[in-house]
Image (cartoon, rainbow, N blue to C red):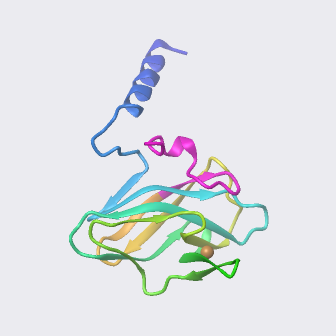
């Protein structure tokens, strides 16, 4: 390893651990007043037809906005679903009419709750890979994001993708 490379690495490590006012990780994506943090997904077993997408969406503006659609490079369709448990049976249903993000509100898409459904996967998702996608908001418009793929059945974002998770 060259000395220059070593210095660059040390600098990168120092920069990564530096606290910032917003506790902002590199996996933060913005469009207009919408801030999307730490999009992530889960690895899928071979043959699985659907994958999932999770993230935190914050509306920093003074007007409500809606997540009305999206896409990823790995699946044919993007839907927003809500998981519920009724009489001990877990089910999920599409959120119709867009997912509202009220002014000042943070909506969390996470396992067992609201989530993005990546329908008709073209290929299995593998741990450690990054999946490019887009989110479409009614007012903020199109936002390009990248999902970090964690393990099968993961309940939290991959550690490396979200260094500020344990605040
Ligand atoms: Cu679903």
Task: Measuring from the top left, give residue 130's x and y in whole percent.
Answer: 57, 52
Q: Percent from the top left, x then y, of residue 152?
A: 71, 55
Question: On the rendered structure, is 47 left or right of 147?
Answer: right
Residue 32, image quadrant = bottom left
The number of numbered discs placed on residues in the rendered structure image is 0
Q: Quadrant of the N terminus?
A: top right
Residue 78 visible here: no
Residue extending furthest toward the left: 62
Instruction: Judge whether 155 appears above or below 49 on screen.
Output: above
The structure residue drawn at horizontal position 61% and vertical position 50%, both measured from the top left corner, is 129
Question: Whole-percent x and y of residue 155?
Answer: 62, 55
Camera-nearest residue between 89 and 131: 89
Residue 112 lies in magenta, yes or no? no
**Quadrant housing residue 37:** bottom left
> Foreground: 119 or 61?
61
The secondary structure making up most of the magenta span is loop
Q: Which residues are magenta?
A: 146-167
Residue 160 colored magenta? Answer: yes
Locate residue 124, reporting x and y percent.
71, 61
Does 51 appear above or below 152?
Answer: below
Q: Which quadrant of the rendered structure holds the C terminus?
A: top left
């Amino acid at each position: 390893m060259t000395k220059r490379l070593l210095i660059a690495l040390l600098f990168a490590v120092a920069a990564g651990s530096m606290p910032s006012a917003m506790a902002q990780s590199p996996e933060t994506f913005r469009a207009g007043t919408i801030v999307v943090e730490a999009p992530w997904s889960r690895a899928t077993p071979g043959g699985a037809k659907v994958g999932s997408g999770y993230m935190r969406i914050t509306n920093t503006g003074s007007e409500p906005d809606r997540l009305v659609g999206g896409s990823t490079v790995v699946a044919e369709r993007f839907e927003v679903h809500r998981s519920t448990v009724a009489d001990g049976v877990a089910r999920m249903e599409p959120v119709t009419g867009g997912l509202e993000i009220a002014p000042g509100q943070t909506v969390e898409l996470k396992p067992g709750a609201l989530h993005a459904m990546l329908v008709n996967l073209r290929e299995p998702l593998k741990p450690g890979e990054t999946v490019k996608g887009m989110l479409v908001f009614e007012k903020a418009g199109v936002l390009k994001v990248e999902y970090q793929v964690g393990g099968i059945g993961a309940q939290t974002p991959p550690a490396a993708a979200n260094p500020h998770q344990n605040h």
